[in-house]
Amino acid sequence: MLIKRVLKNKLALPGLLVVVFVILASLFASHVAPFDPLKLSLSKRIQAPFDEHVFGTDHFGRDILSRVLYGGRVSLMVGVLSVLFASIVGIILGATGGYFGGKIDYAIVLVLDALMSFPPLLLTIGLMAVMGQGVKNIVIAMALSSIPTYGRVVRGAVLSIRQKEYIEAARNAGSGDLKIIFLHVLPNTIAPLIVVTTMGVASAILTEAALSFVGLGVPGPDPSWGNILADGRDYISQAPWITIFPGLAITLTVLGFNLLGDGLRDVLDPKLKQ
Amino acid sequence: MLKYTIRRLLTIIPVLWLVSAMVFVLIHLVPGDPVLVILGAAAKPEQVEMMRQRLGLDQPIIIQYWDWMIALLQGDLGASILSDEPVTRLILERMPITISVAAVALFLSLAISLPAGIIAALRHNTYTDYFFMILVILAMSIPSFWLALLLMMLFSFQLNLLPVMGWISIFDNFWSGIQYLILPSVSLAFIMAAIVSRMTRSSMLEVLREDYIVTALAKGTPKRFIVFKHALKNAFAPVMTIIGFQIGFLLGGTVVIEDVYSIPGVGRLILGAIANRDYPVVQGCILMVTSIVVFVNAAVDVAYAYFDPRVSFDK
């Protein structure tokens, strides 16, 4: 039923198609990529696109198309994992605060507010500065900075559900807090969570790109969309294609997730539809 | 209203305290010995000991925190390891540049997004509206620094219209200053314009459905009058919250944009400090920018209460 509605939605369907396309292309990069993304070839330095190399080559003669395909693996993985961790912590904090209320809630809201005051990109940059480059650290840094997004969404949903009669009924029937939270409260937060996590992946991909671009993200030579852009910087007038293609890949992917998120919001929460 | 304002301003204190504590903890997250990270493994023991004393790292952590906090309350963010200059001065020198880029970007995005959002709402479910929505979602998906690079390719390299990078203050030379401001602020304004115009549209749509608007229309009040006099004021409050919320993203985005265009603002300061492991400067920049965000959001909330008097703490 839900799938049918997603497939009929004018935003969700194109979004889903784009996301599936990007995921498949990155997943099967080793089969689709025409060249080895790491293979240096000085005789093929800075070749223009649409010739032997469809997206051209960079200053080391590496094939940009192959690098973009492989780079998608890292960018998507970092995006999905950071959202996964952030949302797990966010769910725990938001559900605890929203359900129990009182001083616990005040403390949790304070922590979320403080975390949220940091410009997300700045906090991620600061964390990367102390932790050092590396895929694992990016996931941690990005997850930490986006916890408040999920914490607040879950807390808001829990607050509105807590007052409902069936929760009272469950409590009177002798259910413990944990049982109520897991069985009755959390399932009701799933709809808004799906929407924010989908859009969260989009913004995580943008953040990874920005981080790697300023040299604080995925270290080379393994490609990520952000560090290919960083490679292209010094050759921007000579070889603009190094910059153009990974940027297009990011835009397309982020667009896909944004469309999917928007469409899912229409499907899952008809009240919000405008 | 006054009571609300005072209470909202008081909530800043615990948040700012927690923010400062988090920033303090940040430097202690450096894996291993931060002094060795700063000086490199080849450092002599005397050097290590000196640096440790200079950063106060030879003290117990509680004492370190106390000293740091007391200094902070006096506006002292410590000294740069690299240049020995006070961090506060380093930041204050560069802050006007960052703020001017962000402010122009903010102005541009509002100038585009508010009218666009209103028009889309008035033409709800027409092709204008659909086109607008597609444009918005596309604009939200473009990385701003990539857009900055594309604009640079087009306007600086291809058309030779604008300078590639660098900075001239508009207070030194107004017209050159403007030229250096255009590309950075346009690339920053893009995403923000998309988000704000979307919010304006949906907020307007909601207000236009309200009974009092329908009544005013039924009475024959001119639509233009209704839109600007009644609808806009009520629709603006949620839009303002989004704008406040976006200030953080704007200032974060400025860091990368400053890097693209070699603008000597706070963003370049922090990235340079990171490269040199100048942690006091990194700490200071993050703390200063975040404090700005905290104050802006408080101001936005107070302004919200002005636009929507139903807001109170008791709800």
Image (cartoon, rainbow, N blue to C red):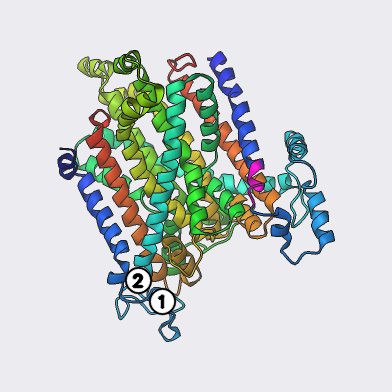
Name the residue type under label 1.
Arg
Which chain contains the residue that carries disc 1?
A: A
Above or below, B191 against A90 in this view is: below
Q: Mark 1, residues whose alpha carbon is within 10 Å: few (<14), some, or many (≥20)?
A: many
Q: Residue at x 58, y 24 (%)?
A: B11
Q: Which residue is mark 2?
A: A66
Q: Secondary structure at mark 1?
A: loop
Name the quadrant containing residue A228: bottom left
Q: Position of residue B160 (x, y in %)?
A: 46, 67
Position of A203 with respect to B126 (left or right) is right
Above or below, A109 against A66 in this view is: above
Highlighted range, magenta: B25-30
Q: Quadrant of the C terminus of chain A?
A: top left
Q: Residue at x 72, y 42 (%)?
A: B77
Q: Position of residue A43 (x, y in %)?
A: 42, 86
Cα distance in 3D space between marks 2 and 1: 8 Å
Q: Is residue B234 magenta?
A: no
Q: Which mark is residue A62?
A: 1
Whether pointer 2 and pointer 1 mark residues with C-beta atoms closer than 8 Å, the reply is yes
